[in-house]
Structure formats: C-alpha cells, structure tokens
Image: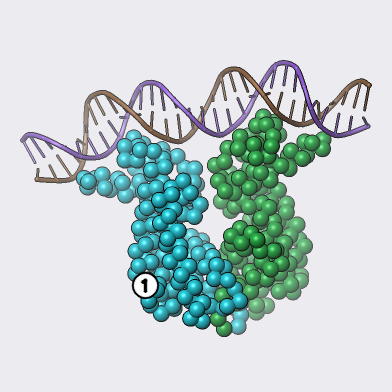
Chain colours: A green, B cyan, C brown, D purple
DNA sequence: AAGAAACGCAACACTGATGTTGCAGTTATT
DNA sequence: AATAACTGCAACATCAGTGTTGCGTTTCTT
C-alpha cells in the first residue's frame, strides 16, 4: 500500500472509532471530514458502511488481542497479570472507544473474535476465584462484568488519568471497593 | 386523554425505550410495530422523532426522580439511603433502559433535569465520604462513577437478579469490591 | 523524470426514514 | 344511541445518507 493511502486509512479508522463511539449513527461523510479526506476516498477503501465498521472493530480486536497475549493471563501470578492487563487495555479502550459488545452483532466474524477474547478473560477471572483471590460468594460472571465496567469507566470518564494510575485504581476498586476499612 | 390513547401512548414509550436502548438509531416505524400501532399514530402524538425521544427521557426522569425522593438521600443514614436508592433505581433502569447520559444532548431541558438528579447523587456520595463510609484516598467522582456503572451492570447484564438481591450485590461490591478478605 | 497509484471534485441514482394529509372505520365517553 | 376522539390505511413529498462513476490533478515510488 502506498504511504499516503496508509496514512489516510489510519486517519479514517481512528476518526471513525472516535465519532462512532460518540454516536453509532455517525455518517460516513462526517467521518471523512473528521479524517480530512474526501467522502469518495472512504467509499473506495470500504465497499460499504458495514465494511468500515468491521475494519474499526478489527483494529480494536487486534490491539486488545496483543494486550491479552502480553498479560500472560494463564501463567503469570493473578495480581501481576491483572495489573498488566489493565495497564494495557485502558489505552486500547481510549484509542478505540467503540463499544464492541453492542455494535458487532452484524459482523459474525468480529463477534466470534470478541467472544473468544471474552472467554479468555472469563478463564482468568475463574482462575482468580480458584486461587482464592476473589470472594466465593459472588459469581465469577459478576466479577467479570464489574471488571469490564471499571475499565470502561476509568478509560472514558477519567481520560486525564494516566494508564498506570488508572490501572491501580481499577484493580484496587475491583478487589476492595471504595468503602472505608 | 381517552383510555385507548393512553394505552397506546404507554406502549409507544415503553417500546421506544426498549428498542432505542438496543439501537439508538431505531426507526419510528420499528417502534410503532413493536408498540402494535400504526406509524401515523406515533407521528400524530409526537411532532417529530426528537419529541418522541424527549418523551421517553421524561418518563425515565420522572421515575428516577421519584426514587431519589423516596430514598431520602440527604436525611436517612447513608447505608439505608444507599440501599433504598439501589433497590428503586435498578427496576427503573430496567423499564427505561435508554442511556440518558448519551442521548439527551439534543434536549437541553431533559439534560438539565438529568444534571440536577446527578448532582443530588454527587451530594449523597460526598456525604458518604464526609461521614466516613468511603475511603478518602479515592475521589468522590470516581466513587460516583463506579456506583453508576454497577447499577447499570446489575440492571441490564443480570436481568434475572431480583431488585433486592441486585441492590445487595451492588452495595457490597461498591463498598468492599469482589476480592477475598 | 516517468509511470503508477491514489486523491479531490462534481454529478448522479437509489434507498430508507421522516413527516403530512384525507378518509373511512373503530372505540370510548356521555 | 349519539357524539367526539382516536385509529388504521394508503398515498405522497421531502430529505439525508449511501454508493457509483468519470476526469483532471496530486502524490508517491523506482
């Protein structure tokens, strides 16, 4: 691919992710403007709107997958893996703020990848339960859902928080809540 | 208003809330079908799409406001008020699943009401901090955001959980997290 | 410098959603 | 039972977003 084409592609994907996160109904024209390219350029690269969305999803899934790999969720000690995962996934969630769980239903392939990554996290949370890091009187499913939401909250509602501090905050809130001892 | 008109209005608002929560771009035609009325009936009641959205928002705000009033956030002991709020707001969030924070920007009046209710919760969380129920090393804003997300998670990702149990789970997770002691 | 690749621009067709109107038929109210 | 209110149906106009094509120009690559 030519260099300028790669630049534009990148700009379109990032602009798309940003605008679509704010409003899933954002037009391709608006995305083109935000990316600084002509509308027809977007249409040339992506056969239709769905293809553009899929590309954005893939970009997010690629980044998230790298984070999951590098966190070594199945091998590293639970607290270490947890922190490494959080510190990696929060920037990913900020760069690709699209809500994968809601917008991928029309893209079975992307949804399958999402589900696969999701199950890796499920397994990690289950390991945390098995190894005694989480209370046994709350379901792993609940713990997992809470973790997801804490990540999103730290990533998007506290954008000025640096990733390491955000990871600390999420981890501590996840394990200990916000109540006084 | 005639009785059948009231029934239809109610059906449209509820169907609208449900479908718009799943997909904010849902067409008025789809809402009409889900509500079991003709598309023109919806257009007769609501001058335009925006008016329909506003009506859905108002319905949610009305329900939420009642919950805030009855929780006695400024007077009742913090743990009592918290539990009463949670037990009330979770069903509201289920009946009116629309995401107010994202969809109200085009309706200044509704957004002002939302902001007002939000500030009541802010004040409550601040009181919880002042009275020693929350850790002082995390910001009240973070605690507040976490509370919001826990409510949404319990309400929508665990729809089979009864409101009282859901309130217990949210309260305990909020204060103590999910980590083992 | 030359060729290839990508781009912007203008113009067009197509589609789905919105919003309106008229009218005949149904339902609630008194 | 009479009246008023409401509804469904059909038809229409309008508009915004999508997707396509052709052409001259710009921008990379070698």
Q: Is residue B115 visible from the viewing direction of this image?
A: yes
Q: Chain of mark 1?
A: B
What's the residue at 38%, 44% (across, down)? B52
What's the residue at 38%, 77% (across, down)? B76
Indicate whether D15 appears above or below A55.
Answer: above
Q: Residue D23 occupies which quadrant of the picture?
A: top right
Indicate whether A90 appears above or below A100.
Answer: below
Residue B71 at x, y percent in the picture: 37, 71
Residue B78 at x, y percent in the picture: 44, 78
What's the residue at 35%, 46% (across, down)? B12
Q: Residue A171 occupies which quadrant of the picture?
A: bottom right
Indicate whether A116 appears above or below D13.
Answer: below
> Looking at the figure, which quarter contains the C terminus of chain B?
bottom right
Q: Residue A50 occupies which quadrant of the picture?
A: top right
Q: Which residue is mark 1?
A: B72
Residue B152 at x, y percent in the picture: 49, 62
Residue A150 placement, left or right of B79: right
What's the residue at 63%, 55% (across, down)? A115
Residue A96 placement, left or right of B136: right
Q: Is residue B165 visible from the viewing direction of this image?
A: no
State the SS at label 1. loop
Residue B103 placement, left or right of A176: left
Indicate whether A20 appears above or below A134.
Answer: above
């Amino acid at each position: 691919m030519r260099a300028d084409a790669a630049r534009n592609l990148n700009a379109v994907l990032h602009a798309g992710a940003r605008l679509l996160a704010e409003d899933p109904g954002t037009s391709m024209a608006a995305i083109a403007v935000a990316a600084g390219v002509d509308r027809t350029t977007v249409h040339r690269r992506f056969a239709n709107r769905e293809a553009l969305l899929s590309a954005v999803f893939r970009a997010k899934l690629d980044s998230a997958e790298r984070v999951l790999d590098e966190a070594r969720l199945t091998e590293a000690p639970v607290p270490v893996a947890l922190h490494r995962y959080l510190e990696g996934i929060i920037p990913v969630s900020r760069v690709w703020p699209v809500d994968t769980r809601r917008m991928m239903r029309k893209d079975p392939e992307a949804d399958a990848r999402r589900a696969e990554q999701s199950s890796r996290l499920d397994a990690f949370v289950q390991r945390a339960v098995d190894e005694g890091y989480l209370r046994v009187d709350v379901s792993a499913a609940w713990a997992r859902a809470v973790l997801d939401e804490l990540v999103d909250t730290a990533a998007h509602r506290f954008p000025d928080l640096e990733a390491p501090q955000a990871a600390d905050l999420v981890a501590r809130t996840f394990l200990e809540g916000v109540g006084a001892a």
